[in-house]
């Protein structure tokens, strides 16, 4: 099975712009979670989608949003970019049953905001 | 809110030796799951090992084993017979049962350096 894929891998934007990141989960996985990784704050949970519905959300401003399509692919959008949004954005997929099931991570999208 | 603490920013180990990484967590839940993930320079997060809180037996995966002390809320990872490929950042993660859909709570990470 192919792993989790994320596009693009690298992105440079300027303050005030918006950006859309994409994540394709492992075939058969219906849950996609998004994380932000920065040197200062570490790994922080953004949100989780399952069957096109947001089931959980972290403590991020409304500028961060996401959606999931019927094929389980997910996108996250950040509007009005700030310098502090520079980070590695990781997505992870799982079957969506919760509990001990493993989240499989993609390689990440590195976003640099200038 | 649950918190996960990794107090060792960096650990160094020689090839073939053993290293133990510490992790403590704070929770009011009685049932939960704990994980160790590895993040090499490629930045790809890879699951190393997982533990269910209701299981008293410590999990083992080849050269990786954990020491799970539920009462002390401690979850350490032991890497035996260290190899150069073990060099990476290691993250301890917690997953509870409440407000837990898709959410892993990570520690700050421990950088493991393996010397020949």
Image (cartoon, rainbow, N blue to C red):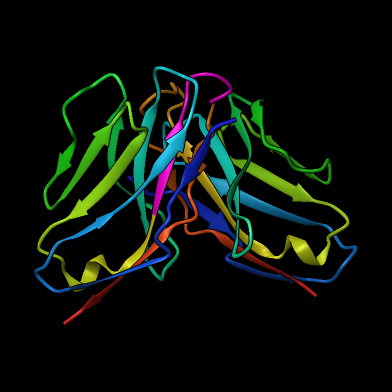
Position of A62 with respect to B88 (left or right) is right
Image quarter in which the N terminus of chain A is found: top left
Indicate yes or no whether the magenta region holds residue B92.
yes
Residue B38: name its quadrant.
bottom left
At which x and y percent is residue A96?
47, 25
The residue drawn where x is 56% and y is 39% is A33
At which x and y percent is residue A19?
77, 57
Indicate yes or no whether the magenta region holds residue B55.
no
Residue B61: name its quadrant.
top left
Residue A28: name its quadrant.
top left
Observer-nearest of B113 and A79: B113
Image vertical order of residue B77 relative to residue B90, above or below: above
Residue at the outermost front position: B72
Magenta stretch, residue numbers:
B91-100
Observer-nearest of B21 and B100: B21
Residue at the outermost bottom position: B116
At which x and y percent is residue A89?
60, 56
The residue drawn where x is 43% and y is 64% is B9
The residue drawn where x is 54% and y is 47% is A91
The residue drawn where x is 44% and y is 57% is B109
Position of A15 with respect to B2 (left or right) is right
């Amino acid at each position: 099975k192919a792993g989790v894929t994320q596009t693009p891998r690298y992105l440079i934007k300027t303050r005030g712009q918006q950006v859309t990141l994409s994540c394709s989960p492992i075939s058969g996985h219906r849950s996609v979670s998004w994380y932000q990784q920065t040197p200062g704050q570490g790994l922080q949970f953004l949100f989780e989608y399952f069957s096109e519905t947001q089931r959980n959300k972290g403590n991020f401003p409304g500028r961060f949003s996401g959606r999931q399509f019927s094929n389980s692919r997910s996108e996250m959008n950040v509007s009005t970019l700030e310098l502090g949004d520079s980070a590695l954005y990781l997505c992870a997929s799982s079957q969506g049953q919760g509990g001990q099931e493993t989240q499989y991570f993609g390689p990440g999208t590195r976003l640099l905001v200038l | 809110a649950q918190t996960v603490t990794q107090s060792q920013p960096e650990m160094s180990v020689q090839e073939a030796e053993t290293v133990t990484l510490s992790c403590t967590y704070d929770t009011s839940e009685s049932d939960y799951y704990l994980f160790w993930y590895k993040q090499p320079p490629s930045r790809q997060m890879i699951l190393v090992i997982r533990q269910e809180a209701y299981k008293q037996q410590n999990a083992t995966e080849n050269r990786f084993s954990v020491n799970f002390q539920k009462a002390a809320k401690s979850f350490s990872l032991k890497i035996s017979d260290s190899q150069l490929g073990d060099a990476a950042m290691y993250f301890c993660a917690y997953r509870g049962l409440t407000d837990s859909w898709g959410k892993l709570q990570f520690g700050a990470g421990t950088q493991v350096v393996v010397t020949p």
